Amino acid sequence: MPDSYSRRNFLKLSAALAVGGAAASLPGKAQAMGQKPGPDLGPATYVKGYCPFCQVRCTYHAEVRGGKIQQIIGDKGNRWTGGSMCPKGLSIVELMDSPHRLTEPMLKQADGSWKRISYAEAVALTAQKMRETLDKHGEKAGDRMGMLMPLWDCRESEMAALITLGMAGCVHTMPPGETCVSTAANMLNLMSGTSNPTTTVDQLTKAKVILLWGANLCELYPAYSRWLPMAKEKGAKILYVDPRRTRTSDWADIQLRPKPGTDGALVLGVIRFLLENQLLDEEKARELVPELDLLREDASAYTPEKVQELTGIAPAELEGFARAIAASDRTIVWFGGSVCRYTNGIPTVRGIILLQGITGNMIGEGRGVLTMHSGKPGGEHEFVEAMAGHVKAAKMNFRRLRLAMDKKRLDILFLNSSYRRYPDANGVRKSIQKVPFVVHCGFFMTPEAEVSHLFVPMTFGPESSGSGYGNEKEAVWRDKIVEAPGSCVPAWKFYGDVGKALFGEKYPYFDSPEAMYDKFCEIVPSWKGLSRKRVAASPDGLVWPIYEENGPELLGCTFREGKLGTADGTMVVKDRVFGRITWTPPKGSPYAKGSKPEFPLVFTQGKVVWHWQHTLTNYAPSLAQFSRGRVVSVHPETAKQCGVKDGDRVFLETPTGRLEAVAEVTSRVLPGTVFTPSHFCPDTPLDANRSEPVNSIVPNSWDRISCQHNGVGCRLVKA
């Protein structure tokens, strides 16, 4: 593999993906992205839809012939994507028609075999199990139930599940963001008063500096990468912080490559340099950060020499980076989930936000903070309470839910997303197996289905109408495009039918997503101007909130009154719960105190352009043709020390376990580190995507908010 990515090669690959013309590495001819060959089935109709796989929420037109989607075409009217779509989204066509898709409900028997049952039986059995728990435990029954979200097909499915569980007294719904962006969302809320991005992507073209802190746009959000050249054409400078050289590196004017998990030390070093060299207006800085002197104390030890010792960034690199930030009065920081994926992520995120605050880049045009995997509009709690009555606050995160499972204090688990997203995945599986009744709403015989008692087949997005939301807090709508096979149902129907069976006439049953969406807009004031008709008419949806019918969208900076959304409009340096801004190595890191010398390398993982989440795209042949299987990237120096050559079979080992992989020797990773893709599946029929879960070898490490995946010690051993 080449040690660098060229724009030309990346664009060539992108074009191949768009037309299905890339060469296949699997037997047979290349698989086409988003389209399938077939006979002439007569005239086509075109129906609008949106991709459910990530927060970009790309919109498209589906070409339908003979009741089947023949291809999907990105909507060129979409202002956020320009009509582009990534290979993950395009793969939904073949996922829907996969011969491995399960289309009938199944109940696990005592001997471990599966028995096909009817949909009505699946609903009745689920309602019966919930009723037994309610009757046995009374007011405490809600603590005996839990749910791993999300529900893939539409927002109405989330609402239906929350209403049903809310009426049963259960509020323990674990969001998927707990493993990626919850640290960022919580710290944004603490520091600025909103858990969402504080601006919109279109503002990138109005910024002088775009600081991508761990935000590998070209691989995680390919459709958003179009904004990088657009911003550069307007004169923006792109700064990129990432230990790896990635496709995003090709757009960067400056890239810093700190040791994984040392971002907090780096940002404190930048803050110290700005203050020490009087490169910012301190009087203005105190308007947003009154405790500037405390921040100065926190950063005082992080001299350029100390930063080099901790991060590997040379003083000259640090100075050039800091001066580029100081020279800009319009900077947008975009940080990825990777920044949060260390046990020291909380002070790191707070430090980055404070950097924006003291440089005057939190409020106004071309300023603010963007995040990955975020943008969820408000109003959900208002609607659920209106439908289900008062809903008590959740008392669990996943760590506590797992403890409840281990102690056999959980009777029912709705397993809607992959348990493999959590560290110590094998241990999580064992915890789930202690739950008496596990329901999995899914598509394939994945590990989640295997560990469940009841499997309910779900519809893919195009097989049901419904709304979705994206990174810009935009609401989008799709109509039903094609019929679902077999007994597949949308999750909104399953949870609605369970609620109706459980609570009878007391349950606020909605017989369609249209009815639920319209009721939502009627109840929630911030959605009054987001009518279904108006949202459906837009190529890319409408940005929340809109309080008036036909009211304008509010793009750009969230803080329209010129002040942050915190109680006093300022940022805290010394917080009652999280304390001061400090830096320590991640738990289990080779450069932390008490580290194990037998695990000297730093472990990292992340998404790649042809994988998205554990349960879906691993079943797409068109994506498998680009996958090279379980690869571990390692620097030439490190490979030599380990006695490993490019292409060797190796074991990647941590204190928790080991995985077999193929070594990729490349300078794209730093010496002393390894990188491996996150999302493989042990049960996919496609060899290129089959591997044990990477999180099976990740220790169960937590910060105050979320579970973490990166930075622990590991080693590489030739197989």
Image (cartoon, grey):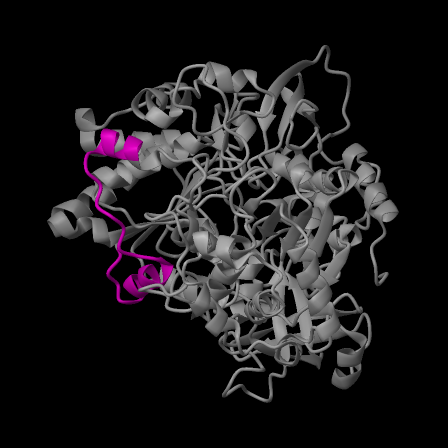
Q: Is residue 534 above or below residue 654?
A: above
Residue at the spot 73% in from the left edge and 52% down from the top edge: 248
**Which stretch did the figure color magenta?**
382-410
Magenta stretch contains residue 528: no
Residue at the spot 28% in from the left edge and 24% down from the top edge: 509
Residue at the spot 76% in from the left edge and 48% down from the top edge: 625
Magenta stretch contains residue 397: yes
Q: Is residue 181 left or right of residue 599?
A: left
Between residues 341 and 436, which one lies in front from this camera angle?
Answer: 341
Residue closest to the far front? 283
* Residue 249 appears in view: yes
Between residues 247 and 19, which one lies in front from this camera angle?
Answer: 247
Residue 32 appears at what percent x and percent y?
A: 77, 36
* Residue 314 appears in view: no
Identify the image quadrant of the C terminus.
bottom right
Residue 241 placement: quadrant: bottom right
How many tags in the picture? Answer: 0
